[in-house]
Image (spheres, rainbow, N blue to C red):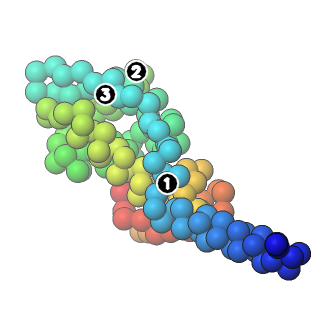
């Protein structure tokens, strides 16, 4: 038999557990993993790799294609160029689609997803020499490695 007091305690515990659960979600990256990028359309021509829908990908991230390009090229140690007219990125090396996906996911994890609340509604701000990830959902600010 439960008394009102027991019910109240139960509800309190439930709220408490729920709150704790939510607090722990971003750390586990649950929300981050829900952020899905469009499927890459990749073409290889000779020793070059072309991402045909690069602009579409960076639009979903809400990031400047040139910034994402800089990141990719640096990580790959390759040169390349962005074709603004067609929204395509050409990388002057052969890269697998899996590698590109991994790098883009890493970019999203570091430069798009808010580490505090897990929302993707963020923007990058350059303050002097420091890059800061500003969350529009919770207001958190997080310095990130320079791009
Ligand atoms: Zn946030």
Q: If the image is split into quadrants, where does the C terminus sit? A: bottom left
- Give the SS element for disc 3: strand
In this picture, residue 64 sits left or right of residue 105: right
Q: Residue furthest front?
A: 1
Disc 2 or 1, which lies upstream in sequence? Answer: 1
Closest to the observer: 93 or 115?
115
Question: In whole angstroms, how far apart are the C-alphas of marks 3 and 1?
Answer: 28 Å
Q: Which mark is residue 86?
A: 2
Asked whether the residues under the numbered discs 3 and 1 touch, taking CB atoms below 8 Å apart as contact, a structural biologist would say: no
Side (left or right) of 63 relative to 76: right
Query: Where residue 17 sits: x, y (%)?
Result: 64, 70
Location of residue 142 with respect to 105 vertically, above or below: below
Which residue bears the numbered disc 3?
A: 51
Point out residue 53 in the picture as x, y percentages from the top left corner.
39, 25
Q: Secondary structure at mark 2?
A: loop
SS type, badge 1: helix
C-alpha distance separating marks 3 and 2: 11 Å
**Tag of residue 3:** none
Specify the label residue 30 is tagged with: 1
Determine the image quadrant of residue 7.
Answer: bottom right
């Amino acid at each position: 038999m439960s008394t009102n007091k027991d019910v109240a305690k139960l509800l309190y515990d439930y709220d408490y557990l729920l709150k704790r659960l939510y607090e722990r979600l971003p750390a586990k990256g649950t929300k981050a993993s829900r952020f899905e990028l469009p499927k890459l359309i990749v073409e290889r021509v000779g020793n070059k790799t072309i991402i045909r829908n690069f602009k579409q990908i960076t639009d979903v991230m809400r990031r400047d294609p040139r910034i994402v390009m800089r990141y990719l090229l640096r990580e790959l140690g390759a040169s390349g160029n962005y074709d603004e007219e067609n929204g395509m990125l050409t990388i002057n090396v052969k890269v697998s689609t899996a590698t590109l996906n991994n790098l883009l996911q890493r970019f999203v994890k570091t430069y798009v997803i808010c580490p505090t609340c897990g929302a993707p509604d963020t923007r990058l701000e350059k303050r002097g020499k420091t890059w800061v990830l500003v969350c529009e959902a919770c207001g958190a600010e997080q310095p990130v490695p320079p791009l």
